[in-house]
Amino acid sequence: MYAVVGCSDCSGLWIVTDLRAQETATCARCGSRHRTAKLRRLFETENRRTAVEARAKMLARRAGEGEAFESVDDAAAANAGLDDDEFLAASGLDPDAVAAAGERAEQGSGSTGAGDRASVVRAAVSELDDPDADAVVEYATDRGVPTDAARDLLDRLYDRGEVRRVDGGYRPL
């Protein structure tokens, strides 16, 4: 279940997943912590994409751009702007070299013994009891992942929705 919720402090809107599974949620805009039972649910759905679209529509209406938002069709919105390779090339970077560097960074040097770096961080979240960020980083560094890389990978896994924060700790999704 996905819900678009509003912050009572700053009026920010953000998407929360599975409100029943967590006691608190933090506003992405101002950082205020709220009890999920008291959050105002502006929209609820089973589909993340639908929740994202609903939040976007609410933000457009709030900015007085509701009509403009409604006039953009889905295909045009999906194709708007530069794709990643065009952006990198316009920035003077070789897209193939960037892709290769990304693959090397995700895989690490191979010395971790438990697969690539991201797999080590995923394993930390899955195997540790109530792991906080420091425990995940310690687990990963013990297995050959550099400290900064472990923190960065944990943030990326959170941003991608592979892990979630619950009461100061992390849980796999």
Image (cartoon, grey):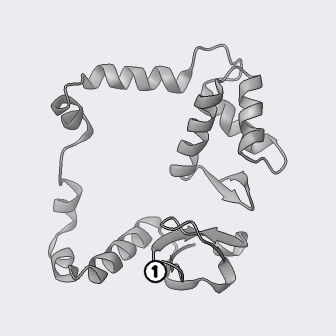
- The front one of 114 and 58 is 58
Q: Local crowd at mark 1 within 10 Å, few (<14), some, or many (≥20)?
A: few
Number of numbered discs on residues: 1
**110 vs 130: above or below:** above
Check disc 1 and report the residue beneath it.
Answer: 11
Residue at position x 67%, y 35% in the image:
121
Q: Tell me the SS state at disc 1.
A: loop
* Quadrant into which the N terminus falls: bottom right
Which amino acid type corresponds to the residue marked 1 in the rendered image? Ser
Q: How far across and how far down the image is residue 78, in percent?
A: 23, 57
Q: In this view, does 125 lie to the left or right of 55?
A: right
Q: How far across and how far down the image is residue 30, in percent?
A: 51, 68
Q: Quadrant of residue 99?
A: top left
Q: Quadrant of residue 76?
A: bottom left
Residue at position x 82%, y 42% in the image:
128
* Quadrant into which the C terminus falls: bottom right
Q: Is residue 143 left or right of residue 7?
A: right
Q: How far across and how far down the image is residue 18, in percent?
A: 63, 70
Q: How far across and how far down the image is residue 96, in percent?
A: 29, 22
